[in-house]
Image (cartoon, rainbow, N blue to C red):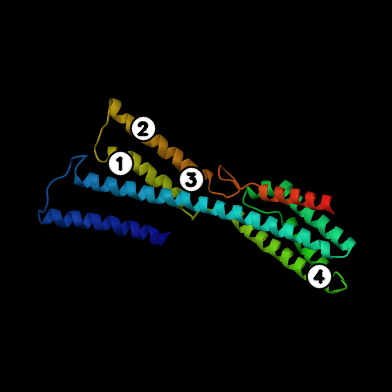
Amino acid sequence: MVAYTLSILAAVGVVMLTALVFRLFRRGGEDRDPGGPSAGHAGAMLSAMFLLVFAIAIIVPWTKADTARQNTHTESQAAIDAYWTAAGLPDDAARQVRTALREYVIFVVRDEWPLMAQGRMDPVGAARMDELRGRVSDLEVSGEDEEEAKGNLLQHIGAISMARAQRSADAAAAPPDGLLFLTILTGVVVIVFPFLAGARPQGLTILPLVAMAALLGFGTYLTWDISRAFDGPLAVGPEAFQGALQEFARVGEGV
């Protein structure tokens, strides 16, 4: 924070020093016109700064939501693969593993998804995966086919755990610190800049400024509303896991 403050003070100091030097050497002329070169240059730069910050505030959550959505499909597909692979185990073991997978996916959809909108996960889900991994590791199998099925199943469970860890990171992820504040600050400055420059719009001439302020306010609110991958207009839904449950049901009917 100190570094940011010093950088701002340094930039302001450069402007003040330059203005003083030019005044001492009597270079240039007075610029009091709201539409003059000083106001025009500053206004253009402020608008560019706002657009840059606003673009970052939109693109970062949008990209994060897209990545989180893809990861849910990776996790659900790993669960489906594990469900299919369990068929190579002894009957009782296969039934237990499939039941555990089905209960885990139901837990994610029903109990864990609402928590992810708040940026957190339920530790019960990770405990269930650890328990299933331990159960499969301790499973005694006979024959090359069952041994191969056990090894493949452990790989799929590991893939589920890895994707779950990524989903946890996606749920907790938020835009860089200060980005929302900077978006609000630059938006406010852009709105009030014509008045700071000396312009006094009246009547119909103020309508474009009001329209711009309304759109900037809506855009700024939008950057806050989409800041989390599992909440807001861009929220990632549990469709991938619901599809996994449908696949489980289809596989079960075919057994």
Circles 1, 2 touching at the beta carbon (< 8 Å): no
Few, some or many C-alpha atoms within 10 Å of disc 4 (few <14, some 14-19, many ≥20)?
few
The residue under the point 47% across, 48% down is: 58
Residue picked out by circle 3: 223
Q: Give whichever of discs 4 and 2 has the lower sequence position.
A: 4
Q: Secondary structure at mark 1?
A: helix
Bin the neighbour count of mark 3 within 10 Å (Cα to Cα): few under 14, some 14-19, many 20 and up: many
Question: Mark 4 — residue?
Answer: 137
Is residue 104 in view? yes
The residue under the point 25% across, 58% down is 14
Quadrant of the drawing holding the N terminus: bottom left
> Circle 2 sits on which residue?
210
Cα separation between marks 3 and 4: 46 Å
Q: Is 35 or 106 nearer to us in this picture?
A: 106
Disc 1: which residue: 193
- Return the residue nearer the eye: 182 or 229: 229
Residue 136 is left or right of residue 69, and the answer is right
Amino acid identity at mark 3 = Thr
Q: Which one is nearer the viewer's eye here, 169 or 86? A: 86
User: Reading the chain from its start, which is encountered first: label 1 or label 2?
Assistant: 1
Q: Nearer the viewer, mark 4 or mark 2?
A: 4
What x and y, as percent, mark residue 246?
Answer: 75, 48
Q: Are marks 2 and 3 in contact (CB under 8 Å)?
A: no
- The quarter of the displayed image where residue 231 is located: top right
- Nearer the observer: mark 3 or 4; the answer is 4
